[in-house]
Image (tube, rainbow, N blue to C red):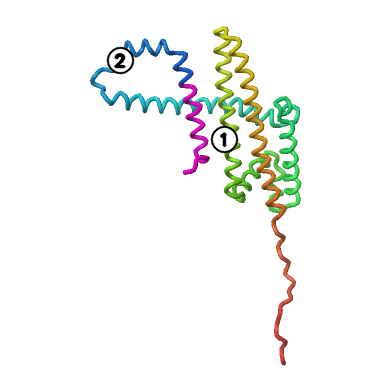
Amino acid sequence: MQLNTLNRVISLFLIGGFVVVLAAASLREEIGKFLVQHPFGPGWGPTAGVFLAVGLLSVTALAGAVVDALSNLTVRRFIRKVLAKNRFTAWIFLCAGEFEEQDRWREAFKSVLRDNSKYKVLGEEKRMINPLSAGIFFRTAEKEHAEWLIQHHSMYHLSADFVIILIAIVVFAWLRELHGVAYCCVGGAYLLTSFALDNYLYTYQLSFRNAYLVIKDKPEPEVATGLEDSTPNAA
């Protein structure tokens, strides 16, 4: 299996591992007390290592999945529903140029749908434009192009997940009166949101462009002329 087909799983473990490390660092005293009160006895032997490895792997996957779910409900929804909808909000996050490029290909795609009898009905539904372009892309794009889009979309997910972690660190640092750390994390969250928005817009730019070219370059059906070469009838 290729690496980019595992991007979603890898991102979950990257996020989950980071969360586990932060939790262990912040709760090191409590963890130490727990291990003192509940030590692994000599009877455990190698079983203790296997138990800890499997448990840590499961906890890492769980933490990554929880962060990804929170990101889907907050940061990624905010990007899809607000930031990617108009040029001004995209400009706030330094993505005005990418928004304009994506919007040009979106309008070109919509115009070619209006002239195509096969997709005209779907093109009239505003909420179907993005899914339709994605469907055409994955049906017609070459393998290298599909991998390129998947990589950018995975970076959109990964960046949004890290934004959730940084926001949590901001709250934690502010409660501990670590204002410098909080300000740095706010700046990092802004940059990662900008990066996520840029990747999101670019994936749909690729999708619209490919779908437009596929429909536009489709050869017209040949018109039958009714004329056929035949040998003259001697009779």
Report which quarter residue 78 is drawn in: top right
153 or 66, which lies in front? 153
Apparent side of residue 40 relative to residue 167 in the rendered image (left or right): left
Label 2: how many Cα within 10 Å (few below 14, some 14–19, many 20+) = few
Task: Read off the magenta span.
Answer: 1-20
Q: What secondary structure predominates along the stretch shown in magenta?
A: helix
Q: Position of residue 233 (x, y in %)?
A: 71, 88
Q: Residues within 10 Å of mark 1 (few under 14, many from 20)?
A: many
Does 99 appear above or below 24? below
Q: Position of residue 23 (x, y in %)?
A: 46, 17
Residue type beneath disc 2:
Pro
Give the secondary structure at mark 2.
Answer: loop
Q: Could you tell me which residue is drawn at 44 percent across and 17 percent down? A: 24
Q: Which residue bears the numbered disc 1? A: 154
Element on which disc 1 rests = helix
Give the residue displayed 60% in from the left and 37% down from the top. Answer: 152
Please say if 150 is above or below 72: below
Q: Against 105, is 175 above or below?
A: above
Type of amino acid at the residue the image marks with label 1: Ser
Residue 159 found in image quarter: top right
Q: Are marks 2 and 1 in contact (CB under 8 Å)?
A: no
Asked if the stretch drawn in magenta spans residue 229, the answer is no
Per the image, is 5 magenta?
A: yes
Query: The C terminus appears in which quarter of the rendering?
Result: bottom right
Residue drawn at 49 percent across, 33 percent down: 10
**Residue 39 tag number:** 2
Seen from the viewer's position, the closer of residues 124 and 57 is 57
Find the distance from the CA under tag 2 to the CA under tag 1. 41 Å
Residue sitting farthest toward the bottom: 235
Give the residue displayed 67% in from the left and 30% down from the top.
Answer: 81
Question: Which residue is most to the left?
Answer: 43
Residue 188, position as x, y percentages in the image: 62, 21
